[in-house]
Amino acid sequence: MESLQRKIEALLFLESKPFTFKKLAHICSAEEEAVATTVTVLQGQYEQRGGGVTLVIESNTVQLMTAPAESAFIQQYIQEEETGELTRPSLETLTIIAYRGPVPKTEIELIRGVNCSLILRNLMIRGLVEEVGETEIGTPVYSATIEFLRYLGLNKITDLPNYEELNKNVHLQELLAAQQNPEDFFQQAV
């Protein structure tokens, strides 16, 4: 049960959207009933701890969220994030999405080399990026928004400087292919 609890908690921490019990059961190779019981136990632990994070269960979905007691603090932080300048990591992520989009989160993180969940959330809050679907394995896919185009004064995404060259960059394509098939990449390099 502890192993299942750790897996569920790790998945909830990783994703910024709710999971259904069914999806958690599938990912963790567990019974849906065991997942529901484990999530309820986990929720009790978060409540007992009284920290800044809580576990919310609604119907058959569950999500990690900030604790209600911290809502005023979080609202202030988000407002500052929405109106402040974009950080360098945010600009890098936004650039990848603009030039490569629609692009899966895994590709963004492969290019940047770090987890981008928080950055993506902040870009979505600002209205510059949107989730437009997901891959076959459930990875979110992101694209730049009309608000992003409006902000830059562009009519379409292909009006970005050097769009064609950067959208179809050969070196980047090779890097991404190498990450998917490392053996092929090393054989070509020899």
Image (cartoon, rainbow, N blue to C red):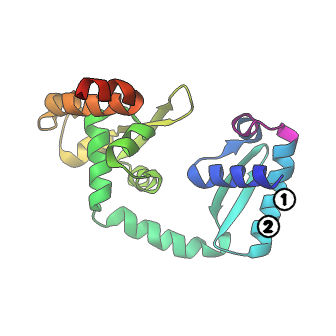
Instruction: Please provide the residue range marked out in magenta.
Output: 25-33
Asked whether residue 40 appears in the rendered view, the answer is yes
Q: Residue furthest front?
A: 190
Is most of the magenta stretch helix, strand or loop? helix
Whole-number angstrom distance, CA of label 1 to CA of label 2: 6 Å
The numbered mark at residue 45 is: 2
Left or right position of 187 against 33: left
Residue carrying label 1? 41
Badge 1 marks a residue whose secondary structure is: helix
Measured as percent of width and height from the top left, residue 132 is found at 45, 33
Is 180 in the magenta?
no
Measured as percent of width and height from the top left, residue 164 is found at 16, 28
- Residue 182 lies, with reference to residue 7, above or below; the image says above
Badge 2 marks a residue whose secondary structure is: helix
The numbered mark at residue 26 is: none
Identify which residue is drawn at 59% across, 71% down: 71
Tell which of 120 and 107 is nearer to you. 107
Mark 2: amino acid: Gln
Check whether the beta carbons of the residues at disc 1 and disc 2 lie within 8 A of each other: yes
Left or right position of 94 against 41: left
Tell which of 69 and 1 is nearer to you. 1
Measured as percent of width and height from the top left, residue 97 is found at 32, 40
- Residue 147 lies, with reference to residue 10, above or below; the image says above
Identify which residue is drawn at 71% across, 50% down: 8
